[in-house]
Image (tube, grey):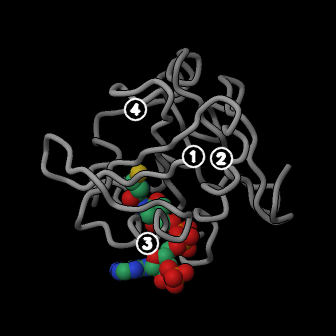
Amino acid sequence: MPQDASVELHILTPDNAKEYFALLDRNRAFFAKFNKLPADKYPDVESVARALAEPGKKRWGIYRFGLLVGMVSIKPWEKDANAGEIGYVLDEHASGEGVTTDAVKQLVMLSAKEYSAFVAEADPRNATNIRVLEKSGFTAGGPNEAGEPVYYLSLR
Ligand SMILES: CC(C)(COP(=O)(O)OP(=O)(O)OC[C@H]1O[C@@H](n2cnc3c(N)ncnc32)[C@H](O)[C@@H]1OP(=O)(O)O)[C@@H](O)C(=O)NCCC(=O)NCCS
């Protein structure tokens, strides 16, 4: 159940491809700053629908006032399947209001039966992203093969 009535998570399926494509497409320049969406990825609604149909990675839409403003995802971490690797993106115009932090906290609660720990790889230049992780209870560890910190949250 959502903690904050203004931020709700709903699983994204291929039926959401049109609205999710619109979110990605209008934020291409913003997401490209941190290599979150290469220019040639998801060129059309069909490519988004295919991605949403793939097994393994679960994507939740972040809805605010009924509108899709972002996405949080989780998949088994390749180094330890008991840990869920999370990722997220948020519409530039919805940023700075705690929406992603709220969504990450909800995602952890929703996934607590499936995973005992959570990880997130963070580009050290992305201070906003790191702040979201810290506010959500993650602490820095790592680094990964690329020399970047990996953030961890353990529930046990
Ligand atoms: C990173 C991103 C998800 C943040 O979403 P958001 O909803 O704005 O984040 P929140 O409002 O929950 O928290 C942002 C925090 O960062 C802080 N912050 C913002 N800009 C900052 C900066 N340049 N340096 C340090 N902290 C910064 C805010 O003050 C806030 O912290 P506070 O509550 O202590 O004041 C969003 O900007 C985004 O989608 N970026 C592009 C894609 C991306 O980087 N994804 C993450 C990789 S997985």
Residue 45's place in the image compared with 150, above or below, is above
Residue 129 appears anywhere in the view: yes
Q: Residue at x 47, y 30 (%)?
A: 44
Q: Secondary structure at mark 2?
A: helix
Residue 95 appears anywhere in the view: no
Q: Quadrant of residue 126?
A: bottom left
Q: CA distance from mark 1 to mark 3?
A: 16 Å
Tell me if label 1 and label 2 are in contact, CB under 8 Å.
yes
Residue corresponding to mark 4: 43
Q: Is residue 118 left or right of residue 60?
A: left
Q: Tell me the number on the disc at residue 107.
A: 2
- Give the mark, 3 or 4, whose residue is nearer the N terminus: 4
Given residues 42 and 55, the one toward you in this image is 55
Tell me if label 1 and label 3 are in contact, CB under 8 Å.
no
Q: Tell me the number on the disc at residue 72.
A: 1
Q: Would you say the beta carbon of the disc 2 residue lies within 8 angstroms of ligand 1?
A: no
Q: CA distance from mark 2 to mark 3?
A: 17 Å
Looking at the rendered image, the disc whose residue lies closer to the viewer, 1 or 3, is 3
Tell me if label 1 and label 4 are in contact, CB under 8 Å.
no
Residue corresponding to mark 3: 131
Q: CA distance from mark 2 to mark 4?
A: 27 Å
Tell me if label 2 and label 4 are in contact, CB under 8 Å.
no
Q: Secondary structure at mark 1?
A: strand
Tell me if label 2 and label 3 are in contact, CB under 8 Å.
no
Looking at the rendered structure, the kind of residue marked 4 is Pro
Looking at the rendered structure, the kind of residue marked 2 is Leu
Q: Would you say the beta carbon of the disc 3 residue lies within 8 angstroms of ligand 1?
A: yes
Q: CA distance from mark 1 to mark 2?
A: 7 Å
Q: Residues within 10 Å of mark 3 (few under 14, many from 20)?
A: few
Residue 47 in the image: state x and y as whole percent.
Answer: 47, 23
Looking at the rendered image, the disc whose residue lies closer to the viewer, 1 or 4, is 1
